[in-house]
Image (tube, rainbow, N blue to C red):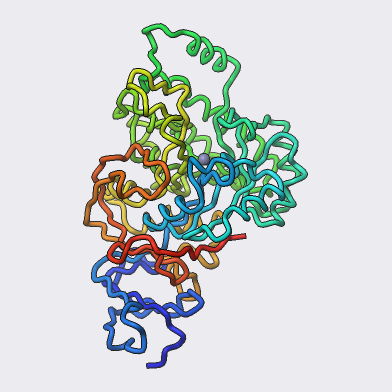
Amino acid sequence: MESKNIKLVITSSRILTSGSIDPSPGTIEINNSGNIVSILPYKASYESYSFLDKTRFHDVGEDVVMPGIVDAHVHLNEPGRTDWEGFETGTKAASAGGVTAIIDMPLNSIPPTTTVDNLKRKIESANGKCWIDVGFYGGIIPGNQDDLVPLIEAGVKGFKCFLIESGVEEFPCVNEQQVRKAYEKLQGTKTIFMFHAEMESEDQKESNKSCEDSNGPMCPSHIYKRFLDSRPKSLEFNAISLVIRVARDFPTVRTHIVHLSAANALDIIRKAKSDGIPLTVETCFHYLCLSAEEIPSGRTDFKCCPPVREDSNREELWKALLDGTIDYVVSDHSPCTADLKFLDKEVGDRDFLKAWGGISTLQFGLPVLWTEARKRGCSYHHLTTWLSKNTSKQVGLNDRKGEIKVGYDADIVIWSPEETFRISTDVIQFKNKVTPYMGKELYGVVKKTIVRGNVVYDVDNGGVANAPCGKLLI
Ligand SMILES: [Zn+2]
């Protein structure tokens, strides 16, 4: 057999190729450029590939071979808050979790990605430090509407704004008038306008303030319910109502709701979608896999905004994911140092209201979701649709990523859905070993992760690769 410039071969009895519902036996041939050149419908033996070094022939037995995960919502915080995370630790963690591309959010780095100059600083920080492929979003803040089109030309994959305080002062929220100005600038582009959809009414601001002022025993702030009550579903419902109302006036711009938590907004989302508004919606691993009832007092590692809600809410999110109202699932990996979660303090002193809101999941999204999804009878096809195909499509990478298909990038996760592991600090690759999943036993062990034909993680061969090979997606 000719070598056909093949540099890597993967063969398995369970490969999920593009368009198939169930995995089947197959052999994937990958060329020197990192593209899939052929997919053979049978399991091959090394003898057919003896021109290759043995280390380049991966017979993975019955492990499932799926498209690499494209996580379209991640905060790596570099430059500026590199004690929280960074490109190196963040992308190594991603590689260990089967993630082959991420899109980095514009905030929590300093400066935020709100101008072309700031994007350049981001790119300089990321260069040579990425173990997987990394793209960037821009941010919309008051007064930067003239930076938006230049940012698109410089390669951002979309824009995010807040309708409520973001938690960092360099990324202020916008009001309806500013949102409209930004929409006007974005008309005719193919970009996405993404909303952190929580918005306080004046009444809510007042009631939160009086709650913060009272230190009485009626509402101790280390109890999760106190925090949950301060971010009710109405905040999301109000914001999403506004977003849909404005989006109706700008039908040529794609609108997106990030990290939906409140299920009571699903009906207006369904209506907007059926009216033909180009609206997409994501939710996160934590909203599908955690519930308010199980959060112990003082466990501020479970805090994020919007909050993890009740079990009944979670069931509605699952229905919406399965019926397509929710388009895809992301991590919203948003780490910080342990002291900002007060985890160095006694339980009674860990104030949910003041703790940093963000959950670290980047490395564990696949097993976290699978552990829940397998109980619900979901298929590998569901997983790959939610984690790879739809996220790639959202950020315009679906001509080369998100599916196992001839001509596509060889971005692949190889994993064992039947095996379990327990999350402990020594398996965590991200910088701060803080996660609400600590100690949990999960189904789904990632064995190898491959980015454009490069093995970036191999559980049997030293774990994370020694050198970075990630490209910037700009
Ligand atoms: Zn986020």
Residue at x-position 66% and y-position 57%: 155
Q: Is residue 283 left or right of residue 103?
A: left
Q: Is residue 270 visible?
A: no
Question: Percent x, y for residue 200?
Answer: 57, 23
Question: Percent x, y for residue 309?
Answer: 39, 30
* Depth order, front residue of 378/391: 391
How many marks do you count on the picture?
0
- Which residue occupies the extreme right position in the image? 146
**In this picture, is 462 found above or below 435?**
below
Question: Percent x, y for residue 146?
Answer: 77, 44
Residue at x-position 22% and y-position 56%: 419
Q: Quadrant for residue 299, please give it.
A: top left
**In this picture, is 34 found above or below 132?**
below
* Depth order, front residue of 239/129: 129
**In this picture, is 215 found above or below 340?**
above
Q: Is residue 131 left or right of residue 62?
A: right
Image quadrant in which the C terminus is located = bottom right
Residue at x-position 31% and y-position 52%: 378
Residue at x-position 47% and y-position 30%: 356
- Which residue occupies the extreme bottom position in the image? 1
Question: Percent x, y for residue 248?
Answer: 66, 40
Q: Is residue 308 left or right of residue 78?
A: left
- Which residue occupies the extreme left position in the image? 419
Image quadrant in which the N terminus is located = bottom left
Q: Is residue 84 visible?
A: yes
Q: Quadrant for residue 444, please give it.
A: bottom left
